[in-house]
Amino acid sequence: MSYEFKLPDLGEGLTEGEIARWLVAEGQEIAEDDPLVEIATDKTTVEIPSPAAGIVSKILVSEGEVVPVGTVLVVIGGDGSAPAPAPQREEKARATPLVRRLAQELEVDLDTLVGSGPQGRITEQDVRGAAGPKEGRREPLRGVKRQMFEHLTKAHSVPTVTWVEECDFTGVDLKLLVPLVLKACAASLQEFPELNARVEDGDLVYLDRYDIGIAVQTEQGLVVPVVRDCASRTLEELDSDVRRLAEAAHAGTLAPEDLRGGTFTVTSAGRSAGLFTTTLLNHPEVAILGIHRIEDRAVVRDGEISARRMGNVSVTFDHRVIDGKRAADFGLAVISRLRESV
């Protein structure tokens, strides 16, 4: 008896996933809970264990393909025959919708190609090769890079405005900067609830939890793990969680639940942050706070010039649901709380 393993629903409204890497091969015997496949979504890359034991009879979706939730990915046990597909329009060429769109863009006739993928499927490389030589080295957008591309394309469609102000960080313990910012944001979001919200089906949904994402740049790309309950936890607890999530992000071991359900995002690139950078919303959130490069600057205090540790703080927000004064007042509230932490 065979077991047809389908792409599972990984939550957060995800409707599709990319086969990042198969961890088994056809003909291989596996046990239940053995590593089976890595799935890349617009949140992260997840390793999925095998739900059944037996021989891997047939792998039906090749690496790099993007398929919808519910698609049969692999057959374990049995004779390896593919499941009967749903009735569909007969097509001479076997290719995914993504490959078909690419062929249309490059003006390649799929019916003239011989596919190099499993079961004669036409791959992205087949289409690009048929399109003829192009200038420069080309590399398909896959995994985290593809996810970033699609995610930021959504974010860029939102009309955003960015507010910026200086903050005096003199005396602030920069080793605890991120947890301090999380605490300051959580407290300020309670005063300005429209920034701790998301747009769903034409409604602005106000959230009564303060689960704040922290943008982490890794070798694979940008990920945003979520620190939970920032309003109620101690600074030490937040610091421990931030360190744990950052380490897991760089190691590529974040769990799916680590990336779900954020209500607001904080981004800080440390020494690479620059004097100011344009931050993009973490869709479907409606606001993000940025901490930019902190350095000694000459400032005037009480008519005297002195060296202070200064940095810029920004708030980028969805102007469809948040007006400029409210966003500015929120940013000033965060700055005020950071100063009070000294």
Image: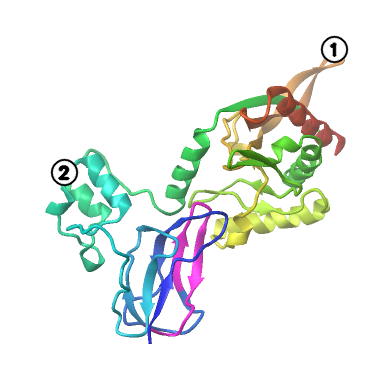
Q: Nearer the viewer, mark 1 or mark 2?
A: 2
Residue labelled with disc 2: 132
Q: Is residue 239 left or right of residue 198?
A: right
Residue labelled with disc 1: 303
- Disc 1 versus disc 2: distance between alpha carbons? 68 Å
Q: Position of residue 200 (x, y in %)?
A: 60, 43
The residue sitting at 85% across, 39% down in the picture is 341
What amino acid is labelled 2 in the image? Gly
Magenta-colored stretch includes residue 42: yes
- Screen quadrant of the N terminus: bottom left
Q: Depth check: 222 or 317 in front? A: 317
Q: Say few, some or many: other residues with alpha carbon within 10 Å of mark 1 (under 14 / 14 to 19 / 20 or more).
A: few
Q: Position of residue 309 (x, y in %)?
A: 75, 30
Q: Say few, some or many: other residues with alpha carbon within 10 Å of mark 2 (under 14 / 14 to 19 / 20 or more).
A: few
> Which residue reaches farthest top?
303
What amino acid is labelled 1 in the image? Gly
Q: Is residue 270 above or below residue 164?
A: below
Cβ–Cβ below 8 Å for labels 1 and 2? Answer: no
Q: Depth check: 191 or 251 in front? A: 191
Q: Main secondary structure of the magenta part?
A: strand
- Screen quadrant of the C terminus: top right
Q: Position of residue 145 (x, y in %)?
A: 44, 48
Magenta region, residue range: 36-55
Q: Would residue 166 be visible to someone looking at this image?
A: no
Q: Position of residue 324 (x, y in %)?
A: 69, 23
Q: Depth check: 224 or 52 in front? A: 52
- Which picture quadrant has residue 326? top right
Query: Could you tell me which secondary element the residue under label 2 belongs to?
Result: loop
